[in-house]
Image: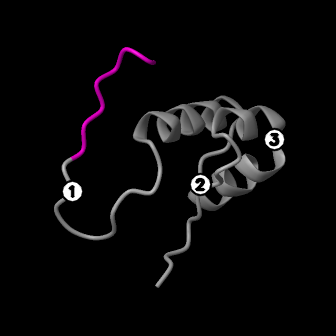
Amino acid sequence: MENLKLAYTYQFGRLWKYDLGVLLKLVLLAYSYGVFSSCQIESFARENKTAGRLISDQVPSSKQAD
């Protein structure tokens, strides 16, 4: 995972607050636990200790902030 070159050029919408590599790891971990929706992944990141350590307790939000 660490060897992947993830690059995202900002074009439209909100700027990314989170590291793309960390988000990819979180999504893959959630998928391995059978969690697929963004709201469930957010809850999974809050409640699962392994996920919390993986993302350094920076839980992504599925809701847009103004």
Q: Residue lying furthest bottom in this view?
A: 66
- Residue 56 falls in which quadrant of the image? top right
Q: Secondary structure at mark 1?
A: loop
Q: Nearer the viewer, mark 2 or mark 3?
A: 3
Few, some or many residues within 10 Å of mark 3 (<14, 14–19, 20+): few
Q: Amino acid at mark 3?
A: Asn
Name the residue at 44% across, 18% down. 2
Label at residue 10: 1
Question: In the figure, 10 relative to 13: above or below?
Answer: above
Of label 2 and label 1, which has the lower sequence position?
Answer: 1
Write down the residue under mark 3.
Answer: 48
| Magenta residue check for 6 | yes
- What secondary structure is the magenta-colored segment mainly? loop
Residue 5 in the image: state x and y as whole percent.
28, 24
Residue 16 in the image: state x and y as whole percent.
38, 57
Name the residue at 57% across, 57% down. 38
Q: Is residue 2 left or right of residue 34?
A: left
Residue 37 in the image: state x and y as whole percent.
59, 54
Of label 3 and label 1, which has the lower sequence position?
Answer: 1
Q: Amino acid at mark 2?
A: Ser
Name the residue at 74% across, 48% down. 44
Q: What residue span does the magenta drawing correspond to?
A: 1-8
- Asked whether the beta carbons under mark 2 and mark 1 sit within 8 Å of each other, the answer is no
